[in-house]
Image (spheres, rainbow, N blue to C red):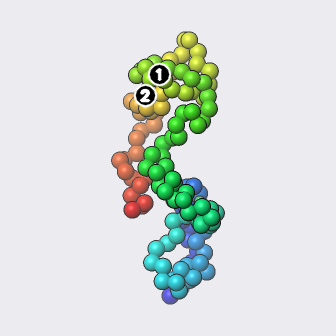
Amino acid sequence: MSFADVTLVCRDCGKEFVFTAGEQEFFSQKGFLHDPVRCPACRRARKQAPDRGRQERRDHDNPTSPPPHQRGGFPAVCSACGKPTTVPFAPRDDRPVYCDACFQAIRQSRGDHPPAPAGSRHTRYR
Ligand SMILES: [Zn+2]
Ligand SMILES: [Zn+2]
């Protein structure tokens, strides 16, 4: 059985990393059936903080954005749905401000950014 370096994408940070031939050999010797899903840095981080695993899985269920208050910015009220939100720029009276959900909906309805086929990004995470 021969091995060749392959490039994989880290499940946690989304960065590409190389699963080297040597590591593949090591994995097969250990009897691991699956390719690694995380880059070495994330694997190390998880080993050091096992509790973070649960936290990260919860984040993964909602990957779009952290709560606005964590990102900083200016408080504003969404012009479409009226909910309080936070924007990264100072709101101006002559410009409507939208929350994330409404902004996405508006942008998609304009066709600037056609939505990807449902679920296609996540199929490999099974
Ligand atoms: Zn990573
Ligand atoms: Zn809104």
**Which residue is rendered at x = 55% and y = 27% of the image?**
86
62 and 36: which one is in front? 62
Direction from residue 32 to residue 89 in the image, left or right: right
Judged left or right of residue 90, residue 117 is: left
Task: Kindly state the secondary structure of the residue where label 1 is placed.
Answer: loop
Above-or-below relation of 113 to 15: above
Left or right, 41 with respect to 30, comes to: right
Disc with the residue nearer the chain's start (1 vs 2)? 1
Q: Position of residue 50 (x, y in %)?
A: 56, 63
| Relative image position of residue 112 (x, y in whole percent) | 46, 33
Report how many numbered discs are placed on residues in the image: 2
Q: Which residue is the site of mark 1?
A: 78
In the image, is the residue at mark 2 within 8 Å of ligand 2 by its beta carbon? yes
Report if the CB atoms under discs 1 and 2 are less than 8 Å apart. Answer: yes
Graded by Cα atoms within 10 Å as few (under 14), some (14 to 19) or many (20 or more), the crowding at tag 2 reads some
What element does badge 2 sit on?
Answer: helix
User: Where in the image, quadrant-wise, is ligand 2 located?
Assistant: top left
Residue that carries the numbered disc 2 in the rendered image: 102
Mark 1 close to ligand 2, CB under 8 Å: yes
Measured as percent of width and height from the top left, residue 81 is found at 40, 22
Label 1 sits on what residue type?
A: Cys
Which residue is at the far left?
118
Where is 27 relative to 65, above or below? Answer: below
